[in-house]
Image: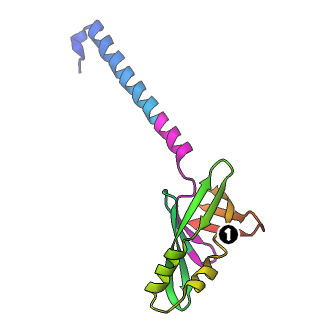
Amino acid sequence: MFIAKNDEEQRSRIWRAVVLVSTALIILIAIFLLTKMFTSNPVEGNWKDENGRMDLSIHGSGSADVTLLDFQEQDKVEVPLAYSIDKDAKTITFSYDDAKLKSVADKSKGAYSENDLETALESLASTYTYSVDRECLTLTESEYGDQMVLDKE
């Protein structure tokens, strides 16, 4: 195939345009990857407790859902949580709203109470230092040093 019918000047212009477009595309992809790498939430995703007691689904909007497995003779119970994350200090703080706990307890029709849910969530509602290593999230409690290991689903 002959480009520009052996006209050296036109081939040179076409070649410069191709190089310019490909360079711009490479720069845009590099900028996208760098911003994605440094601005994304490292703990966002679905995590499963290695002991099989709970599933933790962390969303990017400061909300999370914890699914308590085999809770009070129920198959599972999903409870909404709030969290705040400090990427510089690598800490994450989980908290729950009493009104949302009451709503979840009311939906159970007496199978469990709000106090039962509070007791189950006491160990999770705290500040943790987090570490993400490939498909494994380790939460270390700041106060006592207790660790929770979760695997990515």
How packed mark 1 is, by other alpha carbons closer than 10 Å (few <14, some 14-19, many 20 or more), is: some
| Quadrant of residue 151 within the rendered picture | bottom right
Instruction: Name the spot of residue 93 as percent of width and height, x first.
Output: 63, 62
Nearer to me, 99 or 85 = 99
Looking at this view, name the residue that lies furthest to the right.
Answer: 144
* Image quarter in which the N terminus is found: top left
Q: Residue at x 65, y 76 (%)?
A: 122
Instruction: Name the spot of residue 3 as percent of width and height, x first.
Output: 24, 17
Mark 1 highlights which residue?
148
Q: Which residues are magenta?
A: 31-54
Q: Does residue 150 lie above or below 67 as drawn?
A: above
Instruction: Name the spot of residue 121 as percent of width and height, x first.
Output: 61, 76
Magenta stretch contains residue 35? yes
Magenta stretch contains residue 141? no
| Quadrant of residue 143 within the rendered picture | bottom right
**Image-based side of 3 in relation to 93, left or right:** left
Q: Does residue 116 lie above or below 18 as drawn?
A: below
Q: Residue at x 54, y 92 (%)?
A: 73
Looking at this view, name the residue that lies furthest to the left.
Answer: 5
- Amino acid at dot 1: Met
Q: Residue at x 57, y 82 (%)?
A: 117
